[in-house]
Image: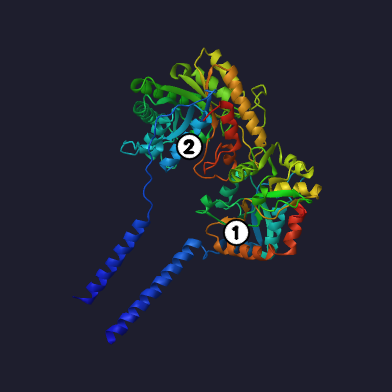
Amino acid sequence: MDARLISASKIVGWGLAILFIFQAMQPAPDLVVLGPPQAVETTMPVLGVHTRLADEVEEWKIKRSLEMVREMGATTIVEFFPWAYYQGENREIAWRQPDMIMEHAHNQGLQVIARIGLTPEWARPEETTLNYLDQDHYADFAAFAAEFAKRYDGKLHAIIVWNEPNLAFEWGYQPTTAADYTELLAQTYSAVQAKAPNVLVLGGALAPTLEPQGSPWGLNDLIYLEEMYEAGAADVMDGLAVHTYGFKFPPETAPAPDLLNFRRYELYREIMTQYGDENPVYITETGWNDHPRWTRAVRPGQRIDYTVRAMQHIENTTPWVETAAIWMFRTPAPTKSYMDAYTLVTPEFIEKPIYTALQEATGGK
Amino acid sequence: MESRKLKASSVKWHFISFFILLTLTFILLTGCGSSETLDRVQANGVIRVGLDPTFPPFENGDYGVLEGLDVDLANVIGRELGVNVEFVLLGYDGLYDALLIDQCDILISALAIDPAKQKDFAYSEPYFNAGQYLFVHESNQIVVTTSDLEGTRLAVETGSAGHVEAIAIKNSIPEIDLITLPTPDDALWTVLQLENDAALVDQVNGRIYLQQQPTLEMIDNPITVEPYAVVTRRADGALLNEINDILEKLLISDEWIAIEEKWLGPK
């Protein structure tokens, strides 16, 4: 036989052997099972938490996160499902990741509120951000939301249409008009109603901000909300999603239009009532931060104390608030920024003392 | 014979080629070859240091003068490079973006090493550990390491990173009596009053407290590591190497001890 041929076959042989060894060294894929269906035990059913599972790759981490949410005594998760992750240019939807999250959440007895946002590349002009959605593609967004609602009907409680549209950043640096957002809300409401009438559609999720009219960064949430109602929002949503943060103030601090604090949701309620909207409020982001470098942060002990008091206040005195979800449960990896100081457990699933305090307050586990 | 020689020569060339390829890959991956920023800094005679001036004692501009441990460190780096230092004041959230878009040449702003950012950025050797340490009374003869905590009363700030770590320690040593208090100063105060045996507090808060209460001691054996480092763009390998050379000498010098003690007090 030709020496070169022998040499080549030796190389191939060695290559295959090395490949075999590397394959053998790979850990076996994790076998994650749903396990028996669970139910949340809690004395504080209003408690929810915003999870961050869409960027979580490993199924066991999704399962463990949701187990820990249940064990904390929270009844509800708010989870972000980015449209851009799931629907390609051929309009086919990759359901694997949302299926995994929804199945595990349902199995843990958790109610799911899905926040949908981020525009796929095919539905926006070049050199726009993921938050850019123009009127030509509102119907595409609505169709995706309706497909999502239909697929998870029975497991999905509500959909939040977009996120903080009163901020320029979150609205793709287009002018932040409440009329445009209300049109998106209306189209989504109709589409979801047609395909999954049991799934609620929540509007708003406005960012608490004092930005005045004409600011390039955004618009005061109270003004924006009034403009939404003026544009007819009351007829095209089943509830209002609200973001409200405590910043440096204790939870009992009275709300005021020129102050950003926890009880700002009461000002939202006043506007809702003024426009005859008796639908419930869903607080889908709230909490305090204890990062040492953030000027709006509190001490870690204050954060625990304020959070528990805030949840007890809502549970005991505010029947029109359906859910109060703490931002945020856990991130897949440390962000090494003030965002880490919002979480309840570490990326390694170590319970922070605030988690334990909430668990004690709910009688969870 | 000729064929064996040829074969040996071929193997040798394959080996050399492989070695060259490996070296080039290493250079490409580490960015060691790029000296563009270093050349520009030296040509202009100025290095632009980005920092967030709201984090005393590392950087603070509250009194109209920019000062702090990081400011002193930047000045030493400038001096050793033979250039002036120009401070670029930034918000904490905008530090990395500012470096990426060349608003500054490096960051020195009490930034902990973040492996997730190493695609775009590189970190120097750490110059400070902001992690958790044990603090004890000077009369303490018991606690030296965590294994000595069995049967002791350990004070922490409620909800802090020290608290989280203390819970983990208590999971392996259940006989620890964990005492939670509202602030790190409260935790240290109880040790000063001999109410508790030790406090688990981060080095910065602990050492600042020690400045007023020298009867407390920090056990110089970190329980957790939160390393602060100088940040460069990933491509600026030559500048990073220069900074690492400077730090290597500085961190074992009396000058560094003096800088640390000026802002944090003695260990």
For this view, does A24 lie left or right of residue A56?
A: left
Q: Position of residue A349 (x, y in %)?
A: 52, 41
Q: Is residue A95 in view?
A: yes
Q: Tell me which amino acid carries mark 2.
A: Ser
Q: Chain of mark 2?
A: A
Q: Nearer the viewer, mark 2 or mark 1?
A: 2
Establish if A177 lies above or below A96.
above
Which residue: 39% across, 23% down? A187
For the residues marked 2 and 1, what is the alpha-carbon distance in whole angstroms? 35 Å
Front-lying residue, A141 or B112: B112
For this view, does A347 lie left or right of residue B43?
A: left
Q: Is residue A54 in view?
A: no
Q: Chain of mark 1?
A: B
Which mark is on residue A116? none
The residue indicated by pointer 1 is: B124
Which residue: 31% across, 80% down? B7
The residue indicated by pointer 2 is: A65
